[in-house]
Image (spheres, rainbow, N blue to C red):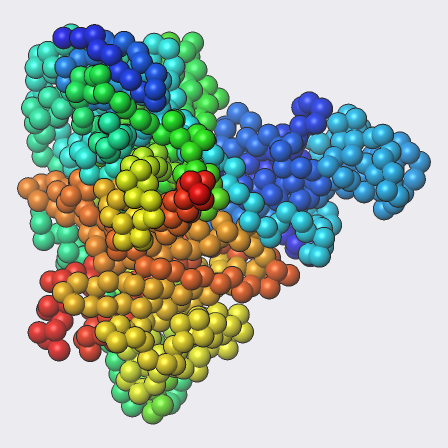
Amino acid sequence: MAREITLTVNGATSAVAVDEDAPLLHVLRNQLDLRASRYGCGQEQCGACMVLLDGRPIYACSHLAVDAAGRKVETAESLMDHPLRAAFLAEQAGQCGYCLSGILLSAKALLERTRAPSRAEIVAALDPHLCRCGAHERIIRAVARAAADLRERAE
Amino acid sequence: MIPNALPGSLADNPRLDQWIGFPEAGRVAVRTGKVELGQGILTALTQIAAEELEIAPERIALASGDTRQTPNEGFTAGSLSIQVGGAALRLVCAEVRALMLEAAAARLGGAARDLEVRDGRIVAGGQDTGLDYWALAPDLDLTRAASGTAALKAGADLRRIGTSAPRIDLPEKLGGAPFIHDIAVAGMLHARVLHRPRTGARLAEIDAEATLKAGRGTVHLHRNGDVVAVLGEDEARVQTAFETLRARARFEGGVRLETPEADALTLLELESAPAEIQERGARPAEQSISRLSSTYSKPFIAHGSIGPSCALAVFDQGRLTVWTHSQGVFPLRAALARALGLDVNDVQVLHHQGAGCYGHNGADDAACDAAILALAHPGRAVRVLWTREDELGVSPFGAPMVVRLEAGLDAGGRPLDWTIEIWSPTHVSRPGARGGVNLLSAEALDTPSLPPPPGDLPDAAGGGATRNAFVLYDLPHQRRVHHFIPHAPARTSSMRGLGAFANVFALESFMDELAEAAGMDPVTYRLSLMSDPRARAVIEEAAGMCDWHNPPPEGRARGFAFSRYKNSAAYLAMAVEVSVDEEVSVTRAWCAVDGGLVINPDGAVNQIEGGVIQAVSWTLKEQVMFADGAVSSNTWETYPILRFAQVPQIETRLIGDPSHPPLGMGEVSQGPTAAAIANGVAAALGARLRHLPLTRARIMQALLEA
């Protein structure tokens, strides 16, 4: 039955009562009102629900909330002032936008480990994600632009 | 540029106040019946309204797709939102501006021609007159019908139309909660609905006890006929319980789906309506010296939206309110009222954005599910979310088609007689089509709505299977034979391009086959049969962009295709570069497009290139599969689509003359992409693949037969 856990999401810590088998995605969306993470398939096959757990991309649709207890969770809400979001706006990288939240987080994980990712590295980082509208090229350009912006800031 | 006839949207919604209002100082209410599907339409319509009203776009409060307050513009479909909906809005805004200037002139005692508008303020000779739209609004009777004759701003004066204004909806999509999936209401019930796995199946058995136990006592079931749903306030528990319900439910009967029926060629074995034949021109007296014929096919394909269908409904004091990502809130309202026995005036349907929409997907059906459950739970908001399996498995599919082409040729390889023969089930099963309700669960209720008589979209509405069946080339004679298949094994409806996808794939593949038979270069051959200057211009531009007349890089081949969508929307010519080993890779694409005046060039390019990428996916990878009585391709694993690593680099040029009216571009690249790829693959292999998708197995087979 429900169990009290402590979740640290985007730097804020909250206590929530969750079932042992409740997916992190539902807890984020319905209990913490963080709705930028999207439900796409529930099967780890599309990437719409991707969040970062201790900096690594995970599928929130199937990852249990109890397993995120006491660890660092990041969702797209944390990226409002991040160069990635500015780059996606600059490149108009999206059509319907449903896939973008998850993509932003995989891209953030990439940029944190790779200062100047090649096109192949960006494509590889985005491989878990599906986009149906065909905004792929814009998305790849946006990630490259954000990487360049970050490098410029660092200099 | 005074139109002879009002755009359809304006003829249907003639009153100016259906489109425009001035509810508060500094704000303009603009209403559209067209809805955002991910295509950027709200941004483009805002540009149009701001342009003709001469106001800053930030002043516009845009309402879209609400049966209580927006004009009824039918469905957001057919690449008509700019061409028709935008044309109507532009005329309305131009007329309102003119009326405002007349009202100002009357107050000031001068002539309207001496006044101008700057961001809603009336200016005379560069001086502010102290009057603005909001002061003048009481002087105007906006209940009058639009004349449709207001002078539009001249091309040289356009400041917003023709610029790449950023998408107004994108910021909220990056870190926000803009989707219908994100609406949360206090006390809302989450619901998952078990749908019949095939048409006509009956729900024989459910395990209610195990389902409720899986929901830990916090969920309940609602059943009506063969529709059963799990509801509760805790979404995670609802989902868990639903998985138990689904695993233990048993259906009987219905139209079983078996593996071989996934092959489009089985359409040829199904009952068809009497052939409908149309001819253009006449067979010349000259005898052909050779004949060529080929048969092509395209399978069932799935919409595959990344977000599963979702809807929210509330039934309170006899009134039903439904939030939906449907393409047509008015037709959906009428269908819901009929299906549920409500007065249409007691139903309000509001559009709220969903994930990308490429045609008639599960949106309307999910809205019906939510409405059914809301009626059973008065006063409670009910949120229905479909599963991935239903999104890929019980949504309407894009229709399979078989297309046979035959031509008699003269000594120079030019067609004398020409026949296109098409076999296809319907391309339209939308709510209201042919008088039917056409909502999935409505057909499974205790009091079911019956499906309407079979039929396809008529030519006057753009045609379904016959869309783009006639070509723009200079042929003395064209004969079109349409074999309508009234009963396909699975439900089919409108999907981006409708019949144009398979027809253009077949026609433009056949053009390459004819060019080869004539010993001519494919681009040169097309130009030899094309006198339309706008068509010639895009063909020549695309050929130039890819350096067509010089060989491609080592190990690559190129293919070419042309079409004008519906023979009435934008013109597009394109080339692709492919490499073929065991599988086909599309590495590059070049598109030249004439869409006349382009409202938002970046938005247009996004649509064209997105269409190319989606059509690459359809062409190389996609086919709905059946097994053991049901759809078996109902996950992303079993229905794979194009991934990031497989996307071509695309270059697009918009070469239309902005003095020509805007032409629809949302579906212009689907058919040509498939044909260009097939032509490139034929160039690479020396063997032609005529059946989609162009899989590894088909490449091997073609090589064996070559």
Q: Position of residue B568 (x, y in %)?
A: 49, 60
Name the residue rendered at 45%, 61% in the picture. B652
Of B298 and B337, nearer the camera is: B298
The answer to whether residue A69 shows anywhere in this view is: yes
Of B294 and B421, nearer the camera is: B294
Q: Looking at the rendering, which quadrant does residue B646 occupy?
A: bottom left
Name the residue rendered at 44%, 51% in the picture. B606
Q: Position of residue B469 (x, y in %)?
A: 37, 64
Of B685 and A8, nearer the camera is: A8
- Classify the position of the N terminus of chain A by image quarter: top left
Residue found at the far right of this picture: B109
Query: In the picture shown, does residue B332 fall above or below B115?
Result: above
Q: Position of residue B101 (x, y in %)?
A: 81, 39
Name the residue rendered at 75%, 27% in the picture. B134
Name the residue rendered at 20%, 78% in the picture. B686
Image position of B89 (left or right of B355): right
Q: Looking at the rendering, which quadrant does residue B344 occupy?
A: top left
- Classify the position of the C terminus of chain A by image quarter: top left
